[in-house]
Image (cartoon, rainbow, N blue to C red):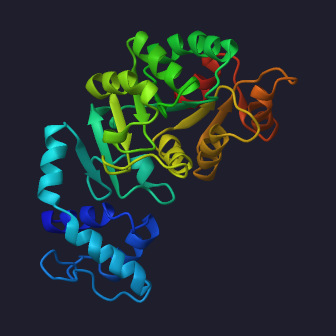
């Protein structure tokens, strides 16, 4: 993909009116994006799959974008951009359904090429039991070279990142917002620490604010870059189960830590085990599945 096409694709990706599907349809209709121009008053041509209203919105957004200024701002903030066409785009993620067109990254991109990556997710309202499980199994996993991926959310996510770093391991965080509007703000220090010494990713342009629907979509990236997903604790309806479902759909392993049958915090994990997820009692249970 040439530089001009990359810039055009990136500009479209910055338009709030352009969804993943819309961008796919545009690229399918015009693979080289030769019909897209920054010079015309109306840069977007007629595409039959777009309504006039949507086309006008995209036109207006394209005309207000200053890609040169934005890209300079990203460089000044040490933000790297990986397109789905780039060689360093994560291979496992490229194989998933609706892989992100772009990944915005801060930190050590080489972590995406190190193996194995294990995603660890769980409740935002982490219990003492959940924290102790992480502290018990992580030392062995880190010694065996596992990279821990999670969502930089409160609770299990944040604790997984912190314990991995405390053990001198590597960790990857995936945001549901842009870097300039990092959410949750309570984890800003963790975000900054990981941006310097580990890796933080987002599929959203840096100025993007967090929306509720971003987080279920974010979960497909967490599972998508990983060989397997470990659910520490989760209620029956939780984002952690969405991550596990993405992993199942992509043919990845799903592991779950059992918990008390009377606690709602483990109803989701126990149900995962009941439905075929591997029950995890120790780090060795994970290692025997993923290390050959």
Q: Along the horizontal axis of the image, is 74 left or right of 279?
A: left
State whether residue 228 is above or below residue 29.
Answer: above
Q: Along the horizontal axis of the image, is 148 left or right of 290?
A: left
State whether residue 12 is above or below residue 71.
Answer: below
State whether residue 111 is above or below residue 98.
Answer: above
Q: Along the horizontal axis of the image, is 57 left or right of 196?
A: right
* Residue at horizontal 36 percent and vertical 58 percent from the top: 101
Q: Position of residue 229 (x, y in %)?
A: 58, 35
Q: Tell how many labels.
A: 0
Of residues 165 and 1, the one nearer the viewer is 165
Q: Position of residue 26 (x, y in %)?
A: 35, 77
* Residue at horizontal 26 percent and vertical 25 percent from the top: 196
Of residues 41 and 256, the one nearer the viewer is 41
User: Residue 262, located in which quarter of the rendered image?
Assistant: top right
Q: Position of residue 212 (x, y in %)?
A: 55, 48
Residue furthest right in the image: 262
State whether residue 280 is above or below residue 102.
Answer: above
Q: Along the horizontal axis of the image, is 178 left or right of 243?
A: left
* Residue at horizontal 68 percent and vertical 17 percent from the top: 127
In the rendered image, the quadrant that contains the N terminus is bottom left
* Residue at horizontal 42 percent and vertical 21 percent from the top: 145
User: Residue 267, located in which quarter of the rendered image?
Assistant: top right
User: Residue 99, located in which quarter of the rendered image?
Assistant: bottom left
Q: Position of residue 219 (x, y in %)?
A: 53, 44
């Amino acid at each position: 993909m040439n530089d001009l096409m990359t810039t055009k694709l990136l500009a479209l990706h910055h338009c709030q009116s352009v969804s993943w599907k819309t961008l796919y349809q545009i690229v399918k209709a015009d693979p080289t994006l030769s019909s897209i121009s920054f010079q015309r008053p109306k840069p977007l041509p007629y595409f039959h799959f777009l309504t006039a209203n949507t086309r006008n919105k995209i036109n207006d957004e394209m005309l207000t974008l200053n890609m040169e200024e934005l890209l300079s701002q990203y460089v000044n903030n040490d933000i790297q951009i990986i397109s789905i066409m780039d060689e360093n785009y994560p291979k496992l993620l490229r194989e998933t359904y609706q892989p992100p067109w772009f990944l915005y990254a801060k930190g050590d991109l080489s972590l995406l090429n190190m193996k194995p990556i294990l995603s660890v997710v769980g409740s935002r309202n982490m219990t003492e039991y959940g924290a102790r499980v992480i502290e018990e199994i992580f030392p062995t996993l880190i010694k065996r070279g596992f990279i821990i991926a999670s969502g930089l959310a409160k609770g299990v996510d944040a604790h997984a990142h912190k314990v991995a770093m405390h053990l001198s391991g590597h960790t990857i965080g995936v945001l549901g917002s842009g870097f300039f509007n990092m959410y949750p703000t309570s984890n800003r220090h963790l975000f900054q620490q990981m941006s310097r010494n580990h890796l933080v990713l987002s599929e959203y342009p840096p100025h993007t604010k967090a929306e509720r629907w971003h987080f279920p979509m974010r979960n497909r990236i967490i599972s998508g870059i990983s060989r397997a997903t470990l659910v520490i604790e989760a209620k029956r309806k939780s984002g952690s189960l969405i991550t596990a479902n993405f992993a199942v759909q992509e043919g990845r392993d799903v592991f779950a830590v059992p918990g008390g049958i009377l606690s709602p915090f483990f109803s989701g994990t126990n149900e995962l085990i009941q439905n075929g997820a591997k029950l995890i009692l120790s780090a060795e249970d994970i290692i025997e599945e993923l290390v050959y």
